Image (spheres, grey):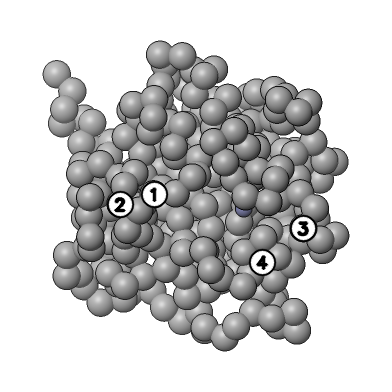
Amino acid sequence: MHRGLPILLALAFCGCDDKPAGPAATPPPAPAELVHTPEFSGHNAYLHCAAICAMGPRYSGSEAYEQQLRYLEKHLHAAGWKTERNPFSAPNGVRMCNLRAFRSTSPAPLLISCHIDTKINVAPDFESADDGASGAAALLELARVTTDERIELIFLDGEEAFARSMSETDGLYGSRFDVARRGNQLPRWQINLDMVGGRNKTIAIPSLDTSDFMYAQYASAIQVLGLSEEKWTVWPGGYMDDHLPYLEAGVDSLNLIAVFSGTSWWHTSRDNMSRICPRSLHESGLVTLQLIRQLLSAGAEAAP
Ligand SMILES: [Zn+2]
């Protein structure tokens, strides 16, 4: 168990203000179109996030969920990725569908995941901007700048519970299905992104669910990028999230998730684009790319 990170360098990326995002807050304008820089662009991720939120609530089995799948496929194919839909049904009969993206049909050692379903029955104007769309947006932009065949992306359905709270039997449907579907062809590592676009967010990885090796990778990435130990820290416990089924199957997993418990916006209409910040998405993208570099080089060193 890890109780905190070592002393790290000063915050490098800031600038998103910390005003509370109430119903009256006006989202900043989205950039007009995608930019084609070689680096990860927080503005591109912001644009994807806004486009996904504009589809409305994207709960499992909804038309908006299907619309989101088509949007993801279009941009993944444009970036040179192959995709595969893995449909399945929840025990209550609700139709669900995970979306995989890969460059090689050989099993990839590194899986990067997010969930793209939104909690059902919140409100007609529920955008679920951070809890769902931000992870999908970050993965789409990662797909544009990442060509390594040792990476697979997966956009998971059914993370959200049907009941008010997640339980051992309600929630994580997509990740549980994916782990079972893979059998013994599991990746070596997984990075899960959840709520990675909020302004002035604090990422807190779950100490109970993080191996010493993965903790060292996280601490190193933060140090290399010069990020704040207060904004990239450790949660003293575990989370129920999409890393768990993989972790329980033996995958070394890292869950990059912002502090959400006890906040006033989580699972409400206030989780909207006014909470999302391009710089925050940019920072999350840079950390993920740094972790990718570290993990793949660690794997290369360990290879015979
Ligand atoms: Zn949620």
Q: Pointer 1: what residue?
A: 238
* 274 shown above or below 232: below
Asked if marks 3 and 2 touch (Cβ < 8 Å), the reply is: no
User: Which of the two discs, 2 and 4, labels the residue nearer the N terminus?
Assistant: 2
- The image shows residue 118, relative to residue 85, as above or below, that is below
Residue 211, given in percent of the width and then of the height, sits at 25, 41
Residue underneath mark 2:
207
Give, as a three-letter code, the residue at label 2.
Ser
Q: Earlier in the sequence, mark 3 or mark 2?
A: 3
Q: Amino acid at mark 4?
A: Asp
Q: Are marks 2 and 1 in contact (CB under 8 Å)?
A: yes
Q: Is residue 125 left or right of residue 164?
A: right
Q: Position of residue 270 (x, y in %)?
A: 69, 71
Q: Which residue is mark 4?
A: 271
Q: Kindly tell me whether residue 257 is visible in this rendering.
A: yes
Kindly indicate the quadrant of the structure image that contains residue 177. top right
What whole-number distance in Å separates the C-alpha atoms at marks 2 and 4?
Answer: 26 Å
| Earlier sequence position, callout 2 versus callout 1 | 2
Residue beneath disc 3: 122
